[in-house]
């Protein structure tokens, strides 16, 4: 993951994280069964071998919208880790600097500086862009 080519975390998020989250959301809403290992591999940024290993360990025969999250929770990629951490923190309507640092694995001081710049202590999830724009990479 070459994160340094983006001026701030928002640009990185829009190009790399948001599209994947949207694709996962669409997939789970439109395809309830027989999701291919290759699709899961691409969306979760893990190898097909890892998908197969997780499926074997969890006794999953076919990937469905119901067991997709079981695979995701066992994945080791950045996108899997974001989703796992988000689930641990949910359902949150507002985030602290600590929450954002933990979920996205961003240096806490960068997040805290963004909060201080905006003169806020928490931020609603639908306004998180304001923080991400303030985080230089």
Image (spheres, rainbow, N blue to C red):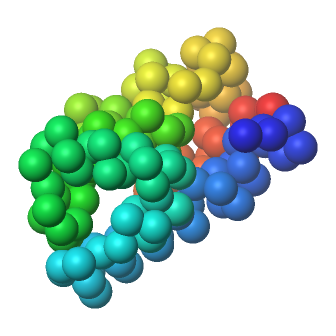
Q: Nearer the viewer, residue 18 or 135?
A: 18
Between 83 and 128, the one lying in front of the other is 83
Task: Single out the residue that lies furthest toward the bottom.
Answer: 30
**What residue is drawn where x is 72% and y is 49%?**
12
Which residue: 68% across, 20% down?
110
In the picture, residue 95 is in which quadrant?
Answer: top left
* Residue at the top extreme of this rendering: 109
User: Residue 13, how many percent across, how many down?
Assistant: 64, 51
Total count of labels: 0
Q: Residue at x 14, y 55 (%)?
A: 60
Q: Is residue 27 above or below residue 60?
A: below
Query: Quick check: 120 left or right of 36?
Result: right
Q: Nearer the viewer, residue 16 or 99?
A: 16
On screen, residue 35 versus residue 118, left or right, reads: left
* Residue 112 drawn at (x, y percent): 60, 18
Image position, residue 106 (x, y; %): 61, 25
Q: Position of residue 62 (x, y in %)?
A: 18, 68
């Amino acid at each position: 993951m070459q994160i340094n080519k983006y001026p701030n975390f928002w640009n990185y998020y829009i190009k790399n994280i948001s599209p994947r989250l949207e694709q996962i959301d669409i997939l789970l809403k439109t395809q309830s069964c027989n999701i291919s290992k290759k699709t899961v591999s691409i969306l979760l940024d893990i190898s097909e071998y890892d998908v197969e290993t997780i499926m074997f360990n969890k006794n999953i025969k076919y990937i469905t919208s119901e067991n997709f999250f079981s695979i995701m929770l066992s994945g080791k990629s950045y996108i899997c880790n974001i989703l796992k951490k988000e689930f641990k923190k949910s359902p949150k309507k507002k985030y602290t600097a600590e929450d954002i640092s933990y979920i996205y694995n961003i240096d806490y001081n960068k997040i805290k500086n963004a909060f201080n710049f905006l003169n806020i202590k928490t931020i609603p999830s639908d306004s998180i862009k304001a923080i991400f724009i303030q985080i230089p990479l």
